[in-house]
Amino acid sequence: MRIILYAFLFVLLGFQKISADTFRCIESERINKRDSLLSIITGAKISDNIISITDFGAIGDGVRNDKPAFDKAMQSAAKQGGAHIIVPPGTFLLKGPIHFVSNVCLELMDGAIIKFDSNPKYYLPLVKTSWEGTFLYNYSPFIYGYNLHDISIIGKGKIDGNASSTFATWKSKQKEGQALSRKMNHEEIPIELRRFGNGFWLRPQLIQFYNCKNITLSDVFITNSPFWCIHLLKSENVICCSLRYDAKLVNNDGIDPECSRNILIENIEFNNGDDNIAIKSGRDNDGWASTMPSENIIIRNCRFKGLHAVVLGSEMSSGVQNIFVENCTYGGYCKRGIYIKTNPDRGGFIKNLYVKNCRFDEVEDLFYVTSMYAGEGLNNIHYTDVKNIYVDSLFCRKVRKAGLVLQGTSQKPMSDVIFSNVEIQEVDNAVSFDNTLNVEMRSCHIGGRVGVPSQASSADKLFVK
């Protein structure tokens, strides 16, 4: 009996030692991966050729259409090999989009407002874009760049989509166009034939850079977007820093990297009517064909406020990997903290998510991973591989529903998940794990910490017979 006991203790202590060593290796790997990424994310180079938008006839009185001046400035920049375009204080009304060219920095000085006229006719002709993970032609995003390099928007000014009276009212009308876009996706209709726009009610993004590299977006204030605020589509080497939001119209996601890589998102003040950050990589057939995952994304020192803080999915069929969420906190209410969502329509993978030192106040759900999002695709076979999730030092004062949720499928269980130093002071449903493998919890306090046990008292004797 003693030999058996010693053997059991040896195995138990051996497991703890291996686990501790493994955890230290994961932490070292996280730091090395992150620091390696930081060394290659540079953002845009900014031209020394400084010009003013007023040199091209812009007035900035909020009444006259200043779009022709912005078009001329971009044309001039293209001829000169690039420019740093200054927008001085004033309200610059644009009846139509800004289409960037390479090597352009648009600087909005403090007090400068770019305000878009939201009449849909101004955002035609159609441009090549993507809508909810499906590639197609649609209305032009209000600020748009395609196949460009070294582009930036900086400064303390404001970008106002002014979309509340038109585009923001379209969601109730979009179902037919949305269904058609997904049908074309699943039937692999050539993208050139997927032409939407007038009559289909698919809202354009406020800012979209598509197939671009070397991008910097910093400091500007963003409000009243027609749809997603910043959409980084098939782009790389991006810095988003110190942006500020008050964007509460319908589906006003803050930043949506899609099939994009090598991105730093830091020091952002979110205040959005939808997801703060939603990392995507294409829907279903289009995502599988893309073979370009969203990867190597660092999110740090952000203040979250809105629907969900950080989301992976649900359009993620090309995969999502190497995501770092560090030293973030809350600026107000969030429905969910970290939310990973996929279903058997999607396929693809989600792996190597590192969450370190993040705090929330009150949420509905704190950390929620589901392979059954929206109850869709449950009869399909495109199961997502979800694995290698590491959460260390996650705090929340109050969770109204679920603390830690992992919902895999029997066909593809979620695997290799570690929760370390997770503290939830008040929670209804603490832990709910389904179809999981190799899930470990280390030094976690769910529902409050337990202190020193009480000593026996005379009252306890009443229950002892």
Image (cartoon, helix red, strand yellow):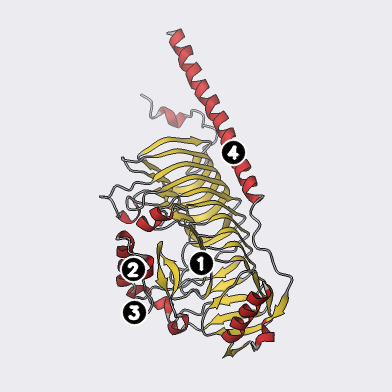
Q: Earlier in the sequence, mark 2 or mark 1?
A: 2
Q: Is residue 66 left or right of residue 283?
A: right
Q: Are marks 1 and 3 in contact (CB under 8 Å)?
A: no
- Disc 3 residue type (three-letter): Gly
Q: Which residue is mark 1?
A: 272
Q: Residue furthest left?
A: 379
Alpha-carbon span between mark 3 and mark 4: 50 Å
Q: Earlier in the sequence, mark 3 or mark 4?
A: 4
- Disc 1 residue type (three-letter): Asn
Position of residue 156 relative to residue 464, above or below, is: below
Tell me where residue 183 appears, x and y as whole percent.
Answer: 29, 64
Q: Quadrant of residue 100?
A: bottom right
Q: Residues within 10 Å of mark 3 (few under 14, many from 20)?
A: few
Q: Residues within 10 Å of mark 4 (few under 14, many from 20)?
A: few
Along the line of sight, which residue is nearer the eye, 164 or 95?
Answer: 95
Question: Which numbered tag is attached to residue 29?
Answer: 4
Q: Earlier in the sequence, mark 4 or mark 2?
A: 4
Q: Residue at x 59, y 64 (%)?
A: 269
Alpha-carbon span between mark 4 and mark 2: 41 Å
Q: Which residue is mark 2?
A: 178
Q: Earlier in the sequence, mark 1 or mark 3?
A: 3
